[in-house]
Amino acid sequence: MEKVEEMKYLIAVPLIIVGIIHLLPVAGVLGARNLGGLYGIALDEPNLTVLMRHRAVLFGLLGVFLLYAAFDAGLQPLGFIAAFVSVGAFLYLACSTGHLNAQLWRVVLVDVVATIALVIGAAARFWQAHAA
């Protein structure tokens, strides 16, 4: 019984961590100043500001979903897939660009840590599903 409880935490905690990470940029919805502080970029162009604020909303939706999925075993596989796609896409785009400011390199580092947590959680979920 104790091992089952440990597995539940090992599966849920990475989704919670990555969910919280995805909620952090939601402050960008409030405007260009918040977005600039998050990413170290000037958002002088109103159209770009709208797109980045919308991006913050989408990150919020994903973050809430990941937090919900952490506690719903049926949604955990989809949660892991969504989280891997999100962090993987950013890491690919960031590393293929290469010319990032300090704030974006910080996001890269956070996403690398998130990926490691996701690998551990997804492996535990896979093991749990196949051990039953």
Image: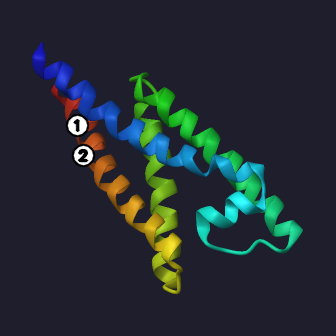
Q: Amino acid at mark 1?
A: Ala
Image location of residue 131, percent across then percent down? 16, 27
Residue 81 in view here: yes
Give the residue furthest to the left. Answer: 2
Q: Relative to residue 56, is residue 79 drawn left or right?
A: left
Marks 2 and 1: in contact by CB < 8 Å?
yes
Tell me the crowding category of disc 2: few under 14, some 14 to 19, or many 20 or more residues within 10 angstroms, Cα based.
some
Residue 132 in view here: no
Q: Nearer the viewer, residue 7 or 107?
A: 107
Answer above or below: position of 51 versus 79.
Answer: below
What is the number of the mark on residue 124? Answer: 1
The residue carrying mark 2 is 120
Q: Relative to residue 109, is residue 38 drawn left or right?
A: right
Image location of residue 21, percent across then percent down? 48, 48
Q: Which residue sits at x=24%, y=34%?
A: 10
Q: Which residue sits at x=70%, y=46%?
A: 57
Image location of residue 49, percent across then percent down? 80, 64
Q: Nearer the viewer, residue 37 or 107?
A: 37
Q: Secondary structure at mark 2?
A: helix
